[in-house]
Image (tube, rainbow, N blue to C red):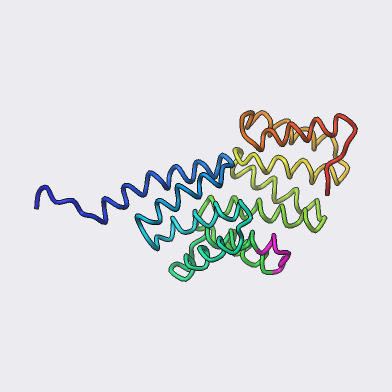
Amino acid sequence: MTGVVDPDRSAHLNASTHIERGWILISRGEPATAEEELEKALRLVPGDPQVASLLGWAQMLQEKYDDALYHFQVTLQRDPAHAIARVNVGYICLKKGIYGEAIEHLTRVIREATDRKAVLYAHYYLGLLYSAREMYGDAEGFLGKALALGPNLIEAYVELGRARWFQGNTDGARQAWREGVAMGKFSPWGSRCAAMLAEVDGGGSPSR
C-alpha cells in the first residue's frame, strides 16, 4: 500500500545514524559521547545485538565493566557467534586479571575469523595481555599483527613502543611512537605517543 511507512524499517534507519556516530566516537576515543548516541539507538531498536555490543564497548572503555558485560552477555545469548561481543568479554577478563579466560575468548575470535574488526582487536588485546604479564616479545608480535591489520589503530603504537622499550629496543620504541604521532596528530592516542617521546627524550622511562 502506497504511503504506508513500515515502523520497524523507520526505526532501524533512524538508529543507523546513531550507530554510525557511536562507532566514529568510539574510534576517536570519545566513549562517553558514544554511549549517549548508542543508548538513543538502543531505544529505537531494543535488543539489537549490534547496538547492544557497541554500547557495551563504549561503556567498557569508560571502565564500566559490569554494565558492559551485561550488554555483551545479552548479545552472546542471542548470537553466540557475535565476535565483537566475544572479543570485548576477553578484554574485560584481561582487565580483571582472569588471563586464562581472556586468552580463550580472544584466540577463539582469531581462530573463527568471522569479523575483521574483532580479529584486529583480539590481536591488540592479546598484546596488552602479554605486556601485563611482562612477556614483551609475545606482546610485540600481537601488537605488530594488529597494526598490520589496522594501521589506524593508533593506541597500538603506544603499546608497541612500550613493549619494545622494555625489551631494550629503545630506537624501535621511539620509531613506534613517532609513527603513532604521524598517524594521529589530533587524536588522544597520537598525543599520548608524543608525550611518551617527550618523556624518554627527557631522560625518563615508561611506567610498567
Q: How many marks?
A: 0
**Residue range of the region highlighted in magenta in the rendering:** 93-100
Task: Identify the residue at image location x=71%, y=68%.
Answer: 100
Question: Above or below — where is 86 with respect to 158?
Answer: below
Q: Residue furthest bottom?
A: 77
Residue at x-position 42% and y-position 48%: 19
In terms of image quadrants, where is residue 172?
A: top right
Whether residue 43 is situated above or below residue 69 in the rendered picture = above
**Residue 119 horizontal/vertical position (percent):** 57, 54
Q: Is residue 153 left or right of residue 96?
A: left
The answer to whether 27 is drawn above or below residue 180 in the figure is below
Nearer the observer, 99 or 58: 58
Looking at this rendering, what residue extends furthest in the left direction? 1
- The x and y percentages for residue 82 are 49, 62
Front residue of 90 and 43: 43
Which one is nearer the viewer's eye here, 21 or 160? 21
Residue placed most toward the observer, 94 or 172: 94
How far across and how far down the image is residue 56, in percent?
Answer: 53, 57
Tell whether position 86 is magenta. no
Image coordinates of residue 41 in percent, x first then y, are 40, 52
Q: What residue lies at 61% left-to-right and 65% top-to-bottom?
A: 105
Examine the rendered structure and indicate whether residue 76 appears above or below residue 45. Answer: below
Q: Is residue 96 magenta?
A: yes
Give the left or right position of residue 5, taking residue 208 as reference: left
User: Seen in the image, is 105 located left or right of residue 166?
Assistant: left
Helix, strand or loop for the magenta stretch, by majority: helix
